[in-house]
Image (spheres, rainbow, N blue to C red):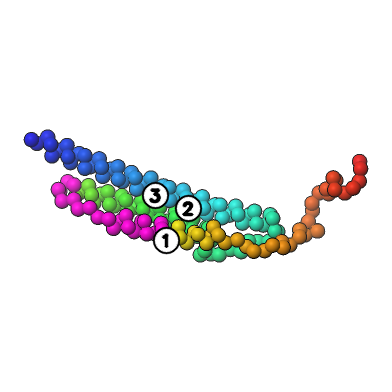
Amino acid sequence: MSQEPKIDRQREHQANERTFLAWLRTSIALIGFGFAIARFGIFLRQIHLTMTHQDAPTHIFAGSEALGVSLVILGIVAIAWAAWHYNQVLWQIERGNYQPHRFMIWVIASVVAILGTLSIPLLLWRERNTNPTPPNPRQSNPPNLLSSGKRY
């Protein structure tokens, strides 16, 4: 008879560990996406500079860098929160008074949904400059021998 409660408690602890590992994977994914989004924004600025020879307009709070940093911060907070929650559940299982809470799930889901919604304008916003400035003629570009009309 004493074997059954021990096995149940072991299963509960293993389920707690699996839940923690799922939150850990989610946090790593949030950090990875945040890093990629922030770096992709820098790449897009460099492409804009190369194509138009003008600095791209930057928005401190509305750019991809801000979204990327927000996702990285959310991932770090989720790791800390998951570790805290894992420890709380561990002691509740040991005492035999575990009570599930959905607050953590709603907070993380809400913040990710808000950040996702805020990223929609970043995807849809395009600079409407259809007449880019020509390159600076003083720029040291090698001559284009094929279009000069001379035969060598």
Q: Nearer the viewer, residue 120 or 108?
A: 120
Give the residue displayed 81% in from the left and 49% down from the top.
Answer: 142
Quadrant, the N terminus: top left
Magenta span: 93-113
- On whether residue 94 falls in the magenta region, the answer is yes
Residue 66, horizontal then vertical, whole percent: 50, 60
Query: Mark 2 or mark 1: which is in front?
Result: 1
- Tell me the number on the disc at residue 114: 1
Q: Main secondary structure of the magenta part?
A: helix
Of the image marks 2 and 1, the number of the one nearer the N terminus = 2
- Tell me the number on the disc at residue 123: none
Q: Give left or right: position of 98 versus 143.
A: left
Residue under pointer 2: 34
Residue 13, horizontal then vertical, whole percent: 23, 42
Q: Residues within 10 Å of mark 1 (few under 14, many from 20)?
A: few
User: Gap in Å between the C-alphas at discs 2 and 3?
Assistant: 10 Å
Among the 4 quarters of the image, the one containing residue 139:
bottom right
Q: Nearer the viewer, residue 61 or 121?
A: 121
Of the image marks 3 and 1, the number of the one nearer the N terminus = 3
Residue under pointer 3: 27
Q: Give left or right: position of 58 versus 119.
A: right
Residue 70 appears in view: no
Q: Residues within 10 Å of mark 2 (few under 14, many from 20)?
A: many
Q: Amino acid at mark 3?
A: Ser
Q: Nearer the viewer, residue 131 or 144?
A: 131
Q: Give left or right: position of 131 versus 25.
A: right
Relative to 77, is 4 above or below? above
Residue 93, horizontal then vertical, whole percent: 18, 47
Q: Secondary structure at mark 2?
A: helix
Relative to 66, is 87 above or below? above
Residue 78 appears in view: yes
Quadrant, the C terminus: top right
